Amino acid sequence: MLVVAGYPAGMRLFRALLLFKLGFWAGMFASAVVMKRAFPSHGDAESDEVRLVAIQNGIEIKSRAQAFRGGSMFSWFGGIAVDLREAKLAPNAHLEVGSLFGGIAIRVPPEWRIESDVKAIAGGVEVAVPEPEAEDAPTLRIDGFAAFGGVAVGAKPIDD
């Protein structure tokens, strides 16, 4: 190998790592563009079941569903904000969430019970919903993951 004076081996390593990192991020963004076209979002304020996909953008929905059954939410370099305080919860409601370099925020009424099994890898999950007093409170089950992103579930009365 040719060794040039003034060009240390550490610089070659730095250049190789920099090129690898740039290639990695370029690949991530290119993949996100392809995924955005392949998996469009479905659901609106009246939908009982949603399939929300936020890839390099944001989605905000204030649901008024009469029998919300759940669905799925996925964010990748994007964000999803869903307000379920005006929705009526159907029995066995289940949400599957996934966040990769993005965020998901879900707001529920304080009367709901939330059962969460969301895992985080270099990200965060917060479920700040007090336990309801009623034993027969409507229950929303949330499963999923957050990798380098976050999932937050909070309760707030509609008046606020």
Image: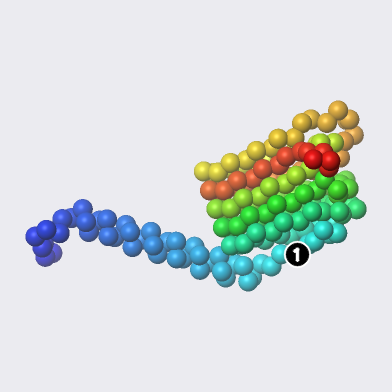
Residue 24 vertical position relative to residue 129 in the rendered view, above or below: below
The front one of 92 and 51 is 51
The C terminus lies in which quarter of the figure? top right
**Residue annotated with mark 1:** 42
- Left-right relation of 143 to 49: left
Q: What amino acid is at disc 1?
A: His
Q: Residue most toward the front?
A: 160
Which residue is rendered at x = 25% and y = 56% of the image?
13
Provide the secondary structure element on which disc 1 rests. Answer: loop
- Mark 1 Cα shell of 10 Å, populated few (<14), some (14-19), many (≥20): few
Q: Residue most toward the left?
A: 5
Q: Position of residue 25 (x, y in %)?
A: 44, 61
- Left-right relation of 96 to 148: right
Could you tell me if residue 156 is visible in this image?
A: yes
Which residue is rendered at x = 27% and y = 56% of the image?
14
Q: Position of residue 86 (x, y in %)?
A: 86, 48
Residue 131 vertical position relative to residue 105 in the rendered view, above or below: above
Colouring method of the image:
rainbow
The N terminus lies in which quarter of the figure? bottom left
Q: Position of residue 154 (x, y in %)?
A: 73, 39
- Quarter of the rendering containing residue 37: bottom right
